[in-house]
Image (tube, rainbow, N blue to C red):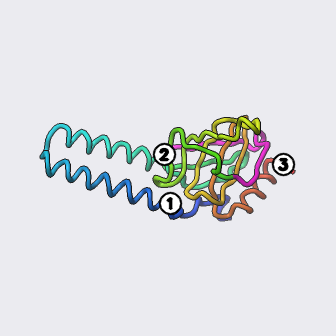
Amino acid sequence: MNDNSYKYGRGDFWARFVTTLIITVLVLGIAALFYFHGVMYISVWVSVVSAVLISLFVLSVPRRLIFEEDLLEIKCVLESSFLPYDKIWLVEEGSLRGKICVCGSFGFFGYYGFYLDLRCFSSGRKMITRVYAKRKDDLVEIVCGGKRYLVGCAEREELIFELRRRADIK
């Protein structure tokens, strides 16, 4: 642990592959559009919309987990989520298995957004899980205030221990 914070670590192979593939296809597609149609309304419109969508994804990339005095801050490039320790009642190892991305990224700069848990019908869990990860492995599931979060961390065991200690979970 460094300065009461944990980094998400580097993205896995699939996230790097998807990110590279999408950016390459977009750049080649926009270049082809300009080559074949010139500077037309549709070419500029597609370029601007693509840039805005990529910017939205980049601004949502998870950066680090920060332990404050009374809460855990899940820090992204632009936004933060705050989980008060007194509302955390479950911390355990998590997995993306059985979850489908509803709104967010499925490998483009990582795994983040809202995911539908297909096991919710048989297990009684919440249907929607908020995911903040750069890799599919090393995930920690946190239930706080009735909401489920999956966060990625290279030091998963240390994070689980520290969260359980601060939230007073046995």
Q: Is residue 71 left or right of residue 132?
A: right
Can you give x and y, in whole percent of width and height, for residue 62 in the image?
54, 52
Mark in front: 2 vs 1? 1
Q: Is mark 1 on a helix, strand or loop?
A: helix
Kind of residue indicated by mark 1: Trp
Q: Quadrant of residue 120?
A: top right
Locate the N terminus and report the quarter of the image it occupies.
bottom right
Which of the 4 image quarters holds residue 115?
top right
Q: Residue 161 carries which label?
A: none
- The amino acid type of the residue labelled 3 equals Ile
Residue to which mark 2 is pinned: 78
Label 2 secondary element: loop
Which residues make up the magenta segment? Answer: 79-94
Residue 129, image x and y in percent? 64, 41
Say which residue appears at 67% left-offset and 52% top-offset. Answer: 95
Three-letter amino acid code at disc 2?
Answer: Leu
- Secondary structure, mark 3, is loop
Question: What distance separates the C-alpha of mark 1 from that of mark 3?
Answer: 34 Å
Residue linked to disc 1: 14
Q: Residue 169 carries which label?
A: 3
**Camera sees residue 85:** yes
Task: Of the two numbered discs 2 and 1 on the same chain, state the one appearing first in sequence.
Answer: 1
Q: Residue at image x 53%, y 49%?
A: 76
